[in-house]
Amino acid sequence: MKKFAAVIVALALATGGALATAMSASPAGLVTLKGHVRTSDGAGTAGIVVGAGVPYDGAPSSKYREVKTDANGRYELHIAAGSKLTMSFEDPRDRYFGVAKGPFAASAGSTHRVDRTLERSAMLAGTVVDSDGDAVDQVTVKAYDAETGETYHSVVTTGSGHFHLTVPAGDYKLRFAPKSGTAFWYGHASTRANSPTVTVGAGKKTAGLDQRVG
């Protein structure tokens, strides 16, 4: 998974994160966001992409900015004020994963401190083939929290039929949706409740989640 694991954080106390707000020197008309990104053992995490601003579907614009954390896991960026802003913490190397929150409001000239503790990610992997055993591409595979039904992430199978889902450690249900044909749950179950639960630990990989289409 590439750029899907974005962690949108509200400016409020949350698990693994902290917020402090103060009216201090910020560039004229802009909001300053700064903080420290750590792993669960307290070490600063370098190279995490921190984005903030108005949600966007393409490249960052004047209303959305991105920076990378430095060698000590610290960052600072400046964005336009707004009432429906979002913030994301993304690991380009897929080592860490977080939970989506937001949106939030921030006024021009304000400074906000947002620290974040990142959770070690896990991986679910498998291959989708057809009745002849040939690889099937363009199958959308989604991971759902086994208890709440919350969607964590989705990917599309490659030309070789492979998929890799980056998720937090936990229990999941997987749904497979071919480009043409009927969608189904892992184990070819017709409902989420009847689908086998897939479990994966932090920093671990659960592979062999292969499925046959048709």
Image (cartoon, helix red, strand yellow):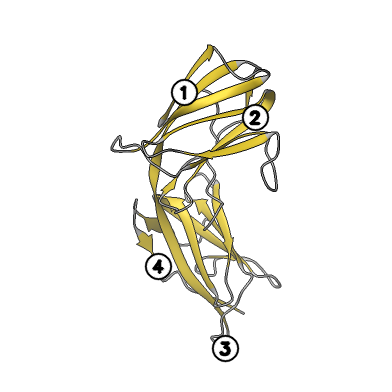
Distance, label 4 to label 1, CA atoms, is 35 Å
Image quadrant of residue 33? top right
In percent of width and height, residue 93 lies at 44, 54
Residue at image coords 38%, 63%: 206
Element on which disc 4 rests: loop
Report if the CB atoms under discs 3 and 1 are less than 8 Å apart.
no
* Left or right of 108 on screen, residue 114: left
Image mark for residue 132: 3
**Image quadrant occupied by the C terminus:** bottom right
Q: Quadrant of residue 51?
A: top right
Which comes before the other along the chain, label 4 or label 1? 1
In the image, is residue 111 above or below residue 187?
A: above
Label placed on residue 13:
1
Residue where numbered disc 2 is placed? 85
Q: What distance separates the C-alpha of mark 1 from that of mark 2? A: 16 Å
Q: Amino acid at mark 1?
A: Leu
Work out whether 200 lies above or below 107: below
Query: What amino acid does circle 2 point to?
Result: Leu
Measure the C-alpha gap from mark 4 to mark 2.
Answer: 37 Å
Label annotation for residue 102 = none
Disc 3 marks which amino acid? Answer: Asp
Q: Which element type, helix, strand or loop, lies under badge 3?
A: loop
Q: State which mark lies toward you, 4 or 3.
A: 4
Q: Left or right? Give the position of 193 relative to 182.
A: left
Q: Residue at x 56, y 85 (%)?
A: 134
Q: Is label 1 in a helix, a strand or a loop? A: loop
Q: Residue furthest left?
A: 41
Closer to the camera, 59 or 190?
Answer: 59
Across the whole image, how many numbered discs are drawn on residues?
A: 4
Q: Which residue is mark 4?
A: 207
